[in-house]
Image (spheres, rainbow, N blue to C red):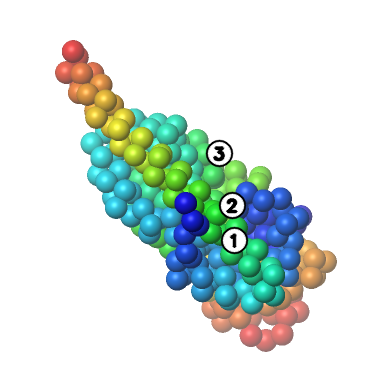
Amino acid sequence: MSNPGQLESRRLAALLAVPEAELGFLESRSLSALARLRRALASSGMQRHRRRFERLASASALLPAALAARLAQERLGAELIAALAPFLPAARAAAMATRLSPAFLAEVAIHLVPETASELLATLPAPLLSATLRELLTREEYAVMGNVVDYLPLEALGTLAAEIEDPRALLAVTAYVGDKSRLGGVIAGFSDQRLIDLARHADQDARMDSLRALQLAIEPDQARRLQALLGLPAA
Amino acid sequence: MSAPSLPAELAAALAALALPAVQRQRLEALLRQRLENQDQQMQAAIDKALELVPALLRGTVRRVLDL
């Protein structure tokens, strides 16, 4: 499994159309700074072409959702759809999303600036979120998954976390979550054994700082649970 | 066409990486090229999609009216 810095620099290399090795110097940079650069790059296109996206959103509203989805997938591609999504009414974007494949939606998610699409993320049906998550897991897109946690409904987080069976993947996603306090309910839903497995992998992979950061962010009762179960210091 | 200047948000994000000068300049050049390519791709794709909408709409209306 790649480390987070490698994943972010790899993603930037793909966006900038250069070999991964050319941006190897970014792997040592802070994750938050790399993620900030990637989001700024993604949102720059939206802002520069705002008027065009507004026109396209208005025009697509005239079409049935299925036809609009087909037009979007065949003519625009994932990156442009991700930029267009915030300009569509959430219900409309969700109706179109249900007509796109999970593989394509994963591509869209990779390019999405989640803070511009919080209403859409809250509107997407749970099975669609799960299918897209499974696709993102296969691609090890942990940054994408972690970044959207801040913008998903709390009630969806537990279900989605349950789908991430690999403790290493779960730790990797957690590293990218901005507001870790939102994971309190997720922790509450985990069995003791699951938490112990998580800590064992965190220890093996030098990720205990992620677990500690999580403990410091969640509710006191769950923080004390982690302390008791995993031998972490008091929060 | 000269590469566009970096938007303020992108320039600030680049500065926040605190890269050595050579690496920063290389990354900035790649970002500028990316913005230029993005401008061309977005403009072409969106304008093309907008051109298609009337024809798609006519087809939809015909199907609805069973013409």
Q: Left or right of A57: which side holds A39?
A: right
At 65% from the left and 54% from the top, the residue drawn is: A13
| Residue nearest the viewer, comparing A51 with A98 | A51
Residue appearing at x 59%, y 61% in the figure: B29
Q: Which residue is mark 2?
A: A15
Q: Nearer the viewer, residue A106 or B44?
A: B44
Q: Nearer the viewer, residue A199 or B47?
A: B47
Q: Is residue B3 left or right of residue B27?
A: left
Q: Earlier in the sequence, mark 2 or mark 3?
A: 2
Q: Amino acid at mark 1?
A: Ala
Point out the residue furthest to the bottom here: A234
List the residue tagged with mark 3. Answer: A103
Question: What chain does badge 2 belong to?
Answer: A
Q: Which quarter of the figure is the N terminus of chain A placed in?
A: bottom right
Q: Which mark is residue B29?
A: 1
Q: Chain of mark 1?
A: B
**Pair 2/3: label in front:** 2
Q: Quadrant of residue A37?
A: bottom right
Real-space Cα distance between discs 1 and 3? 32 Å
Q: Alpha carbon of mark 2 to alpha carbon of mark 1: how far?
A: 13 Å
Distance from label 2 to label 3 (Cα)?
18 Å
Give the amino acid type for the residue marked by disc 3 in the picture: Ala
